[in-house]
Image (spheres, helix red, strand yellow):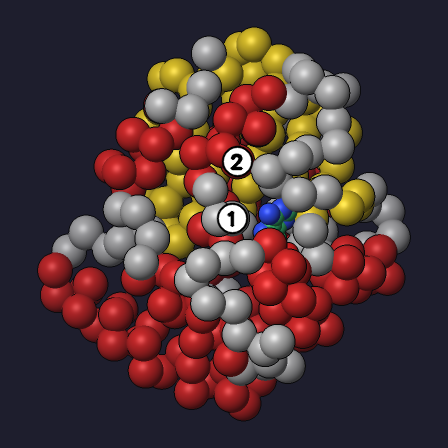
Amino acid sequence: MTRADLGKDRHDIAAMFDGVADRYDRTNTILSFGRDRAWRRATAATLDLRPGEKVLDLGAGTGISTVDLGRSGAYAVGADISLGMLGVGRRVRPQVPLVAGDALALPFADASFDAVTISFALRNVSDTSAALREMARVTRPGGRLVVCEFAHPTVPLFRTVYLSYLMRSLPAVARRVASNPDAYVYLAESIRAWYDQRALAAVIAESGWSQVGWRDLTGGVAAMHRAVRA
Ligand SMILES: C[S@@+](CC[C@H](N)C(=O)[O-])C[C@H]1O[C@@H](n2cnc3c(N)ncnc32)[C@H](O)[C@@H]1O
């Protein structure tokens, strides 16, 4: 298995991320022109974590997104379905608590967290609404959600240039720098097929969350949706 199709079977997805784990952090930064760092900072700032709060970083992968959250003094735990990604994370970030867990059946009790976040992972889960409901289940009433995900650029000319990068240049660059280039063809296709910002906000609002809003990042290449546990 090298490339998950868009059916998003969880075993295929886990195997695909196992295959990119070794070079994931570096490839990510190259393909996003370093913007991933700013997007992670924006996510952490929007979560507005306080010392002592508990936050779940779902789809944490190597823990690259979890590390920033812990800097607030909150207790940040990452969960992921790919043992390969978790293994790299435990090696390069031994200070970050990382556990194996599926977004559709989280290994946590109801209302365990003050906040839950998921960055660049919700798109990979086969049932978006079920994952959002599962995130609501483990969040206390009044707790916060921040979803950071690829989105759809809002300015038409920029959208055309971006789609050309996504479908042509990104797979070509990935062939040079990634450990499983096919995974980056899946990445491009899954971004193109993903909800636009308004549609994702509607799914979040129907899945146990209230006060849903969003902010575009880098002209809508990514977007950050926030919500409060109803
Ligand atoms: C693109 S990586 C994002 C990693 C990290 N959050 C970041 O911002 O770089 C997506 C991660 O989501 C994980 N993932 C995909 N489906 C999942 C599921 N059903 N449950 C938990 N994690 C999942 C993958 O294993 C992968 O590590």
> Image check: 39 left or right of 192?
right
Residue 132 x/y as whole percent: 49, 31
> Image check: 172 left or right of 97?
left
Residue 33 x/y as whole percent: 45, 70
Quadrant position of residue 32: bottom left
Residue 160 x/y as whole percent: 17, 69
Q: Give the mark nearest the N terminus, 1 or 2.
A: 1
Mark 2 residue crowding within 10 angstroms, few (<14) / some (14–19) / many (20+): many
For the point 26% across and 69% down, the residue is 162
Please state the total of marks drawn on the protein image.
Answer: 2
Q: 167 above or below 67? A: below
Q: What residue type is labelled 2?
A: Ala
Q: Tell me the SS state at disc 1.
A: loop
> Image check: 135 left or right of 201?
right
For the point 79% across and 43% down, the residue is 99
Which residue extends farthest left?
A: 156
Disc 2: residue Cβ within 8 A of ligand 1's nearest atom: yes
The N terminus: image quadrant: bottom right
Residue that mark 2 sits on: 131
- Pointer 1 with pointer 2, Cβ within 8 A: yes
